[in-house]
Image (cartoon, helix red, strand yellow):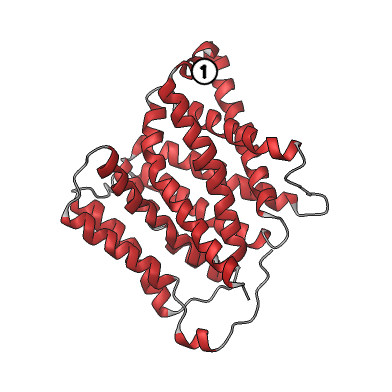
Amino acid sequence: MLLPQEKKLAYAMVVVNASIIGLSFLFTKMALEHASPIDTLAFRFALSFAVMSIPVLLGQVKLQYRGKPTGQALLLAAAYPLGFFTFQTYGLKHASSSEGGILYAFTPVLTLLLASVFLKEATTLRQKLSIFLSVFGVVFIFTMKGSGIDWSNVTGILLLFLSGLAFAGYSVLARSLLRTFSPAEITYLTLGVGFAAFSAVALAGHAAAGTLGSFVAPLASGGFLVSIGYLGILSSLVTALTANYALSKMEASRMSVFSNLSVVVSLAAGALILGENITWYHAIGSALILAGVTGANMRSRRNKAKPRAATPTG
């Protein structure tokens, strides 16, 4: 059983995670004004890996991979960040960002299915309905905005679906591996793989095109540096640490539903920072998302009365 302090910290972590992701869309737009998606990812993961390497090199963060299933951990990194960002980047070339938002909202459903099959996680009917309620809240907002899914964009839709599946797979596999690895070990390995892979692809592309000079050109922009700072430190490093800690303490299906909170945060940020209007359907959709997240994470009275068997939490 989790201690009350651990439970509160795990929930605090996923709320922080969703809040950071909700704001990341603004900074991603800023970064993409100066660099290509692959270059942005290269700088983003280079910074996140470099920042986490500091306490590792100073001995403040202890890492021990010997005797642990590093092959499975590399498979985890292949799902996220490699698979998720690759599918998302190329998917958005063939589909709109609204379609991406709608399809990403179904990630908690995919996580629920994968967790029930591979982790044998059991959820109540109320929790299942609550997860679908949060998904409906996101779809409701995008639909009322006049957005929808153009089913003629088969390639884009398939790639965006695969990006959600990759993230769901990451959540399920990470939940399992965090019984062996610490959150810091998983985070450092996945960030390192992301840094190496995206940097290699970006540099190889510029070398082939003879444009290596343009690779570093965005670093002269203050706006790009600010956006990469947010994306690299907060939206990559901090979100990875918070997600991995939460997954070590709570079920993947419970945690995944919090991802839809990022839509609420994104709407609030758009209103406060960009002066965008909040309409009645934004308010209703946000209320549905919040209700779904709350319902999915409430214990039934039966579970409160009868303690559950302890589960390995890493």
Q: Is residue 201 left or right of residue 27?
A: right
Q: Can residue 17 be seen by looking at this rendering?
A: yes
Position of residue 80 relative to residue 29, above or below, is below
The residue sitting at 53% across, 41% down in the picture is: 236
Q: Is residue 112 left or right of residue 105?
A: right
Q: Is residue 286 left or right of residue 313?
A: left
Mark 1, Cα crowd under 10 Å, few <14 / some 14-19 / many 20+, is some
Q: Residue furthest front?
A: 5
Picture coordinates of residue 71, whole percent (x, y): 73, 50
The residue sitting at 66% across, 43% down in the picture is: 188
The three-letter code of the residue at mark 1 reads Phe
Say which quadrant the N terminus sits in: bottom right
The residue sitting at 72% across, 45% down in the picture is: 61
Q: Secondary structure at mark 1?
A: helix
Q: Which residue is mark 1?
A: 215
Picture coordinates of residue 78, whole percent (x, y): 60, 45
Q: Residue 115 is drawn in which quadrant? A: bottom right
Say which quadrant the C terminus sits in: bottom right
Picture coordinates of residue 222, whole percent (x, y): 43, 21
The residue sitting at 44% across, 52% down in the picture is: 18
- State the count of labels: 1
Picture coordinates of residue 200, whole percent (x, y): 61, 27
Q: Is residue 126 left or right of residue 64?
A: left
